[in-house]
Amino acid sequence: MNLESCQPVGIFDSGVGGLTVASAIRSLLPNERMIYFGDTAHLPYGDKSAASIRHYSKEITGFLLEQHCKVVLVACNTASAAAFDDLQREYGEHILLMNVIDPVVSRITSSGVTGKVGVIGTKGTIHSGTYEKKLRALQPGMEIVSLPTPLLVPMIEEGFVYDDISNAIIRAYLSSEKLKDISTLILGCTHYPIIKNQIRKYYDFRVDIIDSAQIVAQELKEVLSREGLLASDKKGEHQFFVSDHTDYFGKVARMFFDEDIFLELKDLWR
């Protein structure tokens, strides 16, 4: 690998969820320029086959490699579970690669979490069993329960947050017997921090909610520092690409970045 600190950080997700991670990175690493790709033409990833997700992820990673990114962060739990190993094999010699699952697993197992741990995410993430396998590999005795919550991503992408509709859907999922008596809840989808306060309120603030955005941003800082690739000053503006235009994407981007965001349409499959 012949990488330089001035190269941008590439981030991709199926839609707006990865913006939670991008926002955390901007706050922690203000000198880093980001190129974000939201695959809005194919969202949600959670109900797609693993083969399709691998195909989308490879195309997007190839595009970000063409943009001379020094690191590609798979800011989607479903893609991290289904495609990361393939991406590592195909692109690992050319670029740094990160996902959003391993940093969370590392943080939880090293912080002495006790009690019953719940995980919510898309069907793809939960059915892969990735969180349970990785957590138990490091802490065999941990009690872990997982629940697919497939309506949350389309709900968020359609703009239903902080209203009666979203509260009813959140309540329907979190009242599951599976999640009874949990002490910690992992938000196993980068969309979910957008509704984190609603989730915390449902639990009357008594359950520790694990939001991956800050954890992943800190891990990125450590990786870039270790590789000598931290940017000393910012060169150029952030870029945002989508594979299909959605009004809500621009709205959420403005919410996180406190400015109007220019969205560039880039359909890699046309």
Image: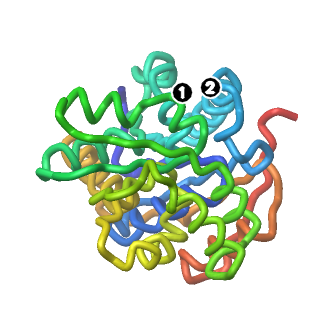
How many numbered circles are shown?
A: 2
When the figure is inspected, residue 210 is found, relative to residue 146, above or below; the finding is below
- Of residue 172 and residue 73, the one placed in the foreground of this image is 172
Label 1: which residue? 83
Q: Amino acid at mark 1?
A: Ala
Question: At label 2, which amino acid type do we have?
Answer: Arg
* Residue 88 picture quarter: top left
Rendered-image quadrant of the N terminus: top left
Where residue 213 appears, x then y in whole percent?
40, 60
- Report the residue at 39% width, 39% height from top: 98
**Residue 169 seen in the current view:** yes
In the rendered image, the vertical position of residue 185 relative to residue 125, given as above or below: below
x then y, percent, for residue 68: 52, 40
On screen, residue 159 versus residue 104, left or right, reads right
Which badge, 2 or 1, comes first in the chain's sequence? 2
Residue 46, given in percent of the width and then of the height, sits at 64, 40
Quarter of the view holding residue 141: top left
Residue topped by disc 2: 54
* Color scheme of the displayed model: rainbow
Distance from disc 2 to disc 1, alpha carbons, whole Å, reads: 5 Å
- Left/right placement of residue 209 relative to residue 163 reads left
CB under 8 Å between callouts 2 and 1? Answer: yes
Q: Residue at x 51, y 51 (%)?
A: 189
Q: Quadrant of residue 89?
A: top left
